[in-house]
């Protein structure tokens, strides 16, 4: 009893300190501080989806010359630099808004607006892509129900759960994570038992290796890692110390990356027609399910396909919707988005209008893309660009805030890590799909125009709590 009371007092003290930290930045505590470290870790894992490679395995396999495990290892290392930079910025600015808040306070408010604007492209597109992929998968399993109806059902279900509060979202996350891990365990047990010959070729194959091939595949594999950054969106709903948010991000990335490497390694050794997959790619997106069928038969193929649909359409899109609504909320309270998006539901303590707007946009985007033959492939090429570009601003913010402004001599965390992360991501952005670059720069251009309008109308971007020198 005494230990429980001590823990409760400690939790209360941490929450009080967190609320005081928020007030020093000019904001009041409006969202519910109810998430534990475990909740944050699970949130990040669900956002990344432990079984994410199920859906894009074939593309990464063919793009990497069969070295799919190597592509995920490099992808994890590349994202780790970004996670470490996030960990530094969330300690300095423990608030919602992610890279919008960090770039705005670490560099300057106008830069923060543009970073938030760019990553908003990724956050807005992701739920629509997830809903579409899941709806198409469910339609293939239940042809009698059209794609659009599945899409509407997924959007409505997730919106209701998110509207009921972050505690409800956290409970659902726990259930979904357990379910995904069970299905992944079934695949691994059956798959490993049916491997004819173990090989290191998924990690390194001298016959197909080249850095251009591997990094080309990494740009696809990175899609699986996007989501660990969503943990930072919940900084104002965490009851933990700020440093724990950074630790949750790093922990989620390591756990997810390990699972990605193991499952793709096993699947690569089960591919029934490796030469054909390397030559022709995986236009139907069924390569992983074909590997599952080779290991356990049709039941395992159907199980992994169903798991992918539910994980992408419910679990992943649920947390994606939550993260996007928090970004809109953070920008709206600073008057860099319509103020109406900053309204918080008093009962459930969630950004209600922002949640509903994300649902509406996701539904409209999903229905439109469902009407196109290239809907999924088009959305997939567009998703990465916004996040990668915003992450570049994040790394710059670490250097400016810690080294330039505070005179830090912690060269590893405040200079080497962010510079390395910046260079890796810059390579990915430069080598991104042309369509993604076109849309990304067009979206950035619109953001610049909006910023000019702000200045012209006397609404220069500003953040609460900054001194005149920082503004």
Image: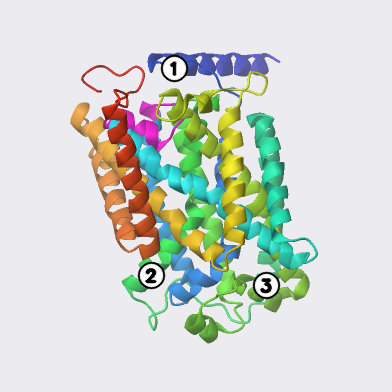
Q: Quadrant of residue 187?
A: bottom right
Residue 146 as seen in the image, left or right of residue 19: right
At a point 29% along the width and 23% down the height, the residue shown is 458
Say which of marks 3 and 1 sits in front. 1
Q: Magenta residues?
A: 91-108
Mark 1 nearby-residue class (10 Å; few <14, some 14–19, many ≥20): some
Whether residue 319 is visible, yes or no, is no
Residue 27 marker? 1
Whether residue 70 is visible, yes or no, is yes
Which badge, 3 or 2, is on the more N-terminal residue? 2
Which badge, 1 or 2, is on the more N-terminal residue? 1
Residue 229 marker? none
Residue 286: x and y in percent read: 62, 72
Image vertical order of residue 153 relative to residue 39, above or below = below
The residue beneath circle 3 is 292
Label 1 residue SS? loop
Mark 2 nearby-residue class (10 Å; few <14, some 14–19, many ≥20): many
Residue 397 as seen in the image, left or right of residue 362: left
Q: Nearer the viewer, residue 65 or 279?
A: 279
Residue 42: x and y in percent read: 60, 41
The residue beneath circle 2 is 214
How many numbered marks are there? 3
Is residue 169 one of those drawn in magenta? Answer: no
At a point 65% along the width and 18% down the height, the residue shown is 3
Q: Nearer the viewer, residue 192 or 101?
A: 101
């Amino acid at each position: 009893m005494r230990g429980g009371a001590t823990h409760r007092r400690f939790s209360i003290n941490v929450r009080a300190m967190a609320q005081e930290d928020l007030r020093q930045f000019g904001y009041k505590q409006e969202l519910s501080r109810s998430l534990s470290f475990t909740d944050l870790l699970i949130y990040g894992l669900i956002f990344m989806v432990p079984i994410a490679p199920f859906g894009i395995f074939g593309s990464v396999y063919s793009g990497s010359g069969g070295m799919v495990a190597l592509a995920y290892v490099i992808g994890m290392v590349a994202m780790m630099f970004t996670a470490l930079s996030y960990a530094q910025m969330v300690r300095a600015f423990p608030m919602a808004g992610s890279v919008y808040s960090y770039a705005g306070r670490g560099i300057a408010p106008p830069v923060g607006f543009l970073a938030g604007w760019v990553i908003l492209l990724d956050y807005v597109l992701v739920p629509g892509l997830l809903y579409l992929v899941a709806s198409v998968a469910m339609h293939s399993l239940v042809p009698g129900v059209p794609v659009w109806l599945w899409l509407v059902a997924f959007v409505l279900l997730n919106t209701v759960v998110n509207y009921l509060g972050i505690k409800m979202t956290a409970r659902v996350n726990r259930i979904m994570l357990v379910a995904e891990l069970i299905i992944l365990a079934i695949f691994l047990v059956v798959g490993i038992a049916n491997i004819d010959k173990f090989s290191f070729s998924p990690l390194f194959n001298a016959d197909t290796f080249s850095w251009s091939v591997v990094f080309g595949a990494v740009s696809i594999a990175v899609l699986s890692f996007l989501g660990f950054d969503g943990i930072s969106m919940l900084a104002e709903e965490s009851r933990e110390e700020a440093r724990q948010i950074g630790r949750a991000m790093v922990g989620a990335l390591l756990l997810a990356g390990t699972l990605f490497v193991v499952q793709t390694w096993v699947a690569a050794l089960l591919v029934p027609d490796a030469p054909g997959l390397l030559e022709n790619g995986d236009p139907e997106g069924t390569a992983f399910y074909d590997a599952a069928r080779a290991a356990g038969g049709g039941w395992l193929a159907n199980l992994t396909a169903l798991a992918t649909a539910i994980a992408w359409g419910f679990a992943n899109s649920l947390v994606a919707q939550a993260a996007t609504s928090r970004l809109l909320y953070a920008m709206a309270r600073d008057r860099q988005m319509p103020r109406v998006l900053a309204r918080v539901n008093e009962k459930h303590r969630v950004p209600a209008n922002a949640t509903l707007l994300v649902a509406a946009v996701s539904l409209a985007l999903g229905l439109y893309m469902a009407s196109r033959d290239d809907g999924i492939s088009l959305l997939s090429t567009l998703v990465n660009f916004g996040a990668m570009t915003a992450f570049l601003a994040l790394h710059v913010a670490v250097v400016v805030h810690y080294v330039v402004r505070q005179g830090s001599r912690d060269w590893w965390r405040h200079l080497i890590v962010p510079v390395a992360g910046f260079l890796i991501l810059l390579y990915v952005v430069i080598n991104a799909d042309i369509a993604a670059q076109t849309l990304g720069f067009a979206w950035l251009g619109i953001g610049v125009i909006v910023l000019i309008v702000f200045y012209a109308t006397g609404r220069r971007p500003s953040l609460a709590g900054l001194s005149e020198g920082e503004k």
